[in-house]
Image (spheres, rainbow, N blue to C red):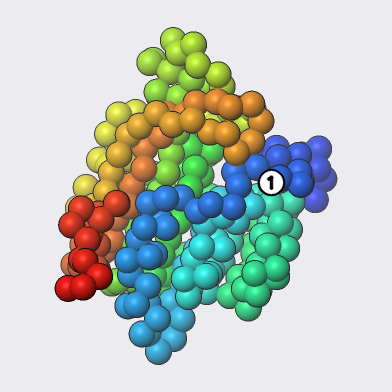
Amino acid sequence: MNPVTDDPSNDFFFEAYDRENIAYGMQPSPELAAYLKQTASAESSRSARPQAIDLGAGAGRDTLALAAAGYDVTSVDVSERGLDRIRERAERANLSDRVKTLVCDVRELSMDADCYSAVIATTVLDHIPGTDAPAVWKKMCAALTSQGMLYTQVHTTEDPGSDQSPGKESDQPVSETAGAVINYFRPNQLVGWACEADSRLRVLRYEERLEWDTTHGAPHQHGKAVLLAVRQDFHPDWFGQPAAFPRSETS
């Protein structure tokens, strides 16, 4: 992972985040967006705004969705340029009072237990060594409140950029930023962590898939594992993504 620095030459993602059309786009992760939409009324009824932390926040697509949904969000990344763009975007959306940024390597970050109603880690556990990722995962789980939600996305060994099978045999195009991924997750590895008793999670959705990415560079393919979970005794209004049996407007 890149050291914290203001020097663009040492910021792996500087060019990707510095573009007019910022890499990874404006749309939040779809599973996270579905959860926020379905639980919006419950969050708005709280007396105080819930706290969220977005690890490896990049240029802020998930941060801004959380802020718009009523969370106070701490955006954490090693890319100062990415955090600059988050502040710019938050100001344009009149969300600056709900967003603060922190330049930090997630391995060095301290998170209090039972502190956050949402912990987000979109492609960050795969950007740190596999020997370090379990400790960060444990901090993420411990930081959740009794009504907390955790969303995680990682690259898997299916990714064409992977140095392991089956990805390394793929003939599909590789991401321009594949060099930042150093820890490809094996099949069922992420959900296995979520199902460990110490994680104290209840899995709402887990999926391993191939997907096309056209948000930066030439179109390329990814192998991803996507996990949406909540604290084990928490039962929010979750109807699936998309909602399996949505309530009709007339009922």
Residue 97 appears at what percent x and percent y?
A: 63, 78
Q: Position of residue 150 (x, y in %)?
A: 36, 57
- In x, y percent, where is residue 206? 28, 44
- Specify the amino acid type for callout 1: Ile
Whether residue 207 sits left or right of residue 104 in the image: it is left
Is residue 23 found left or right of 232 in the rendered image?
right
Mark 1, residues whose alpha carbon is within 10 Å: few (<14), some, or many (≥20)?
some
- Answer left or right for 137 relative to 205: right
Residue linked to disc 1: 22
- x, y percentage for residue 208? 32, 34
Residue drawn at 48 percent across, 37 percent down? 126
Q: Quadrant of the N terminus?
A: top right
Q: Quadrant of the C terminus?
A: bottom left
> Which of 159/163 is in front?
159
- Residue, far bottom: 47
Q: Is residue 56 visible?
A: yes
